[in-house]
Image: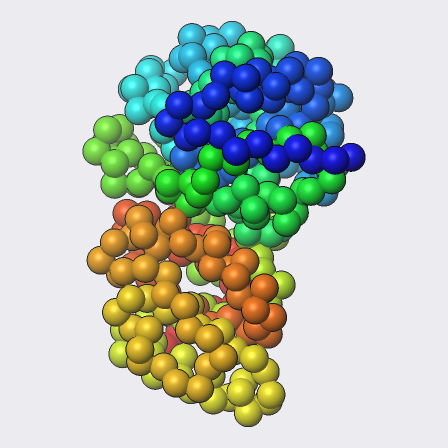
Amino acid sequence: MKTIILKVNADRPEKSKIRAAAKIIREGGLVAFPTETVYGLGANALDPKAVRRIFAAKKRPLDNPLIIHIADKADVYWLADKIPKDADKLMDLWPGPLTLVLKASDIIPKETRGGLSTVAIRMPNHKVALALIRESEVPIAAPSANLAGRPSPTTAEHVKQDLDGKIEMILDAGPTRIGVESTVIDLTSESPQILRPGGLTYEELKRILGDVRLHPSAIADRRVNLKYAPSPGMRHKHYSPEAQLIIVEGELNAMINKIQELVGLYRGKGRRVGILATDETQRSYHGAYVVKSLGSREDPSSMARNLFKLLREFDEEKVDIIIAEGVPMKSLGLAVMNRLRKASGFNIVKAN
Ligand code: TXA
Ligand code: MG
């Protein structure tokens, strides 16, 4: 299959291009499109055959459900059942990087739900995504548009690296603004619970809801053994570059010293070492093959925006080992650390 790549204006999406993409969605095809978080791989959420193609293209385990993207809040009321009142408060934050897990209505195919009785729904804050959903006239199921297990795509080029020849179209509207995926919050338990920290911060959700819990696996620094994973994505390998990834966590100076020690160790073994540092620390290291900065420690949103792109860059530069600094788990730093720890397979070294 030849994948058509269309450049689209992010602020004023060209009608003809959106129409061409929507036609593909309506006919059961796959279109990758930008959202404010990462690029998504879209199909008609109500068409089981189209949804199965998403799983095949991504090589995604069939038990990992998809997020349904909508452009009109009213759609929640026929896609979900028994909607709690917290949902209304949270829907006021839409469009935005927040996904609500609700009880699924009978209309949702089991493929889209990954066999669960719940459904995940969000309204993305991106003109291209919203135009595509409206023009398609169907809700769009869209996981991140990467091969399963790889870092999520924040540019159309990343999508091409993973899915070229497997999908009908990629809409290219430039790099995404936030860079980590949406926050997933479960509203089907007694009190709201964050299953995946993401683009909408825990601090903000606490301010709005008062009562909100973080699922232990969202903040874990080791693999949590889950008898029952409320979010199947928690159990799967994630976000990983090809290179081995080690996270060093601790007080800033101790961390720098530990990383420098590890660079010496691995270099001695003839390994090509990359360091994922920050603006404040990147000049503290010597002897590594390459040092990249995630962004400023004072600006978690910059770190979120750069994370997945940099993980892919290390692979392109054929680094054997990436040693990454831990960053403060505040604001978007929580999502960044969640992704880094998972990407490392919880290969975490504590520096003290
Ligand atoms: O920002 C985002 O959310 C991006 C863009 C494209 O919208 N999408 C995205 O989708 O990250 P995906 O499929 O890569 O991640 C969805 C996560 C998975 O961890 C999945 O297990 C979880 O949401 N999820 C989906 N439906 C669920 C449900 N019914 N209950 C619990 N977790 C669910
Ligand atoms: Mg994903």
Is 285 placed left or right of 79 in the picture? left
Is 189 placed left or right of 283 in the picture? right
Counting from the top left corner in percent of width and height, residue 121 is at 48, 23
**Can the viewer see residue 307?**
yes
Instruction: Identify whether 281 is placed above or below 111.
Output: below
Tell me where residue 202 sits by quadrant.
top left
Work out which quarter of the rendered image holds the N terminus and state it. top right
Is 311 placed left or right of 32 in the picture? left
Task: State the residue in front, 85 or 69.
Answer: 69
Counting from the top left corner in percent of width and height, residue 299 is at 25, 54
- The total of numbered circles placed on residues is 0
Residue positioned 65% across, 47% down in the render? 162
Instruction: Identify whether 210 is placed above or below 165.
Output: above
Counting from the top left corner in percent of width and height, residue 185 is at 42, 32
Task: State the residue in front, 16 or 340.
Answer: 16
Counting from the top left corner in percent of width and height, residue 40 is at 55, 34
Q: Residue furthest right?
A: 1
Instruction: Identify whether 63 is placed above or below 259.
Output: above
